[in-house]
Image (tube, rainbow, N blue to C red):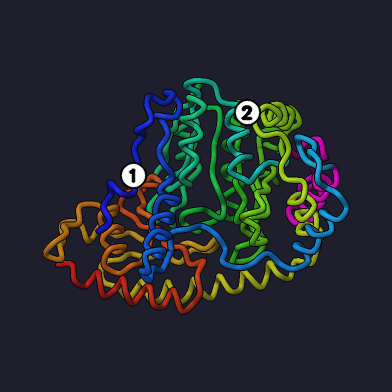
Amino acid sequence: MITEKTITKTNTMGQVSERLARLSESQTLAMAQKSRELKAQGVDVINLSIGEPDFNTPDHIKEAAKKAIDDNYSHYSPVPGYDELKKAVCRKFKRENNLDFTPDQIVVSNGAKHSIANVILSLINQDDEVIIPTPYWVSYVELVKLARGKNVLIDAGIESDYKIKPEQIEAAITPRTKLFLFSSPSNPTGSLYTREELKAFADVFARHPQVYVISDEIYEHINFIGSHESIAQFPQIKDQVIVVNGVSKGYAMTGWRIGYIGAPQWIAKACNKLQGQMTSGASSIAQIASVAALDGDNSCIKEMCATFKKRRDILYNLLKEIPGLKVNLPQGAFYLFVEASYFYGKTDGKTIIKSTNDLALYILNDAFVALVDGSAFGAPDYIRFSYAASEEQLINAAKRIKTSLLKLV
């Protein structure tokens, strides 16, 4: 039997630093680890907890990496990235987003999470406020804690498709506000903002030039309604926006660990300085492979996106037929964020459901399907389903979950 205690590990090695003690363990990674442990024991677990494409990296990208090895890209790379990759990023921004950046405004890092951490640690002082819409990606609030900043959360539920309004941002801004941090398309909800909605946000930030915006656009290419819209497109806030992106999600390159920012030059220089003391440059081979990804044939992106859309429709239609679950239809990424508070107080005779954490553990133990409790994303009444899995797995998972939930009375 798996319990909450087996997922939340405690420190037994002595007293850690205060900054580390303030951080929470990543619940997405913890549930994925528990799923792997059960599989190693021979249990047929369907893992819908991890945010990773289940595709392999396209062949032309792998071939570029092999050539990079033969071409002896085996030495330390420049801290902010190779010039050829930074130029490729600039071309990508112009071609796909109509954004103008120069190579000295680009910093390549070890994944988009590293990029976000660099920006936060470069800008935030103790007690500076960072506005974050809820639900949020798990690491946002933890990175702000690491910088000794203060998280200011704006709630949005399923009724608004998990999207906030500009007047909520305006009301949250104080003299201590330094950053606004959000993702579109969103992890964990799959929601995305339209150009008109982003324009309304930009008008707010234009009135508050001391507030910077981190726009996490890592799911840009997994978009089911058309072209991606970036808040960086609005000239009135050009000097306030840091765009974060990478190759992990769109190109199925999670293990290659390449993320990047496009930012005002002084912020890029600050991130370069920090990264030089923390990690130095990202993998030389992965950087050259990323040039091939950004400049190469992008038909692979469209094929993967079409597959994700089909999977979304399958899982959405199955989950909405399960009594007690509230489901909306997301427009991007590869997640369904499901409201499940209906099951509070219900029991199968052995387990009483008091939270969605209890519910996720019950489903793992009874249905052998791994999900992530919404409290990891600042939304404790919800559960995240990842549909980065085969159609057969999604169908089987939904059947198992329905059978288990019908036991709860």
Q: Is 117 drawn above or below residue 174 in the view shown?
A: below
Of the pair 295 and 221, the residue shown nearer to us: 295
Q: Is 312 drawn above or below residue 22 in the view shown?
A: below
Residue where numbered disc 1 is placed: 8
Main SS, magenta region, reads helix
Of the pair 398 and 10, the residue shown nearer to us: 10
Q: Quadrant of the N terminus?
A: bottom left
Q: Identify the secondary structure beneath mark 1.
A: loop
Percent of width and height locating residue 319: 36, 72
Which residue is depicted at the point 73% across and 38% down?
281
Of the pair 9 and 312, the residue shown nearer to us: 9
The mark found on residue 315 in the picture is: none
The segment highlighted magenta reads 83-107
Residue where numbered disc 2 is placed: 209
Judged by depth in the image, the label closer to the viewer, 1 or 2, is 1
Amino acid type, mark 2: Pro
Percent of width and height locating residue 92: 78, 53
- Left or right of 3 in this view: 191: right
- Left or right of 27 in this view: 367: left
Which residue is depicted at the point 20% across and 56% down?
353
Percent of width and height locating residue 399: 33, 77
Which residue is depicted at the point 30% across and 52% down?
381
Would residue 101 be counted in the magenta stretch? yes
Would residue 352 be counted in the magenta stretch? no
Which residue is depicted at the point 63% across and 55% down?
248
Residue density around tag 2, few if under 14, some if 14–19, many if 20 or more, within 10 Å = few
- Mark toward the start of the polypeptide (1 vs 2): 1
Amino acid type, mark 1: Thr
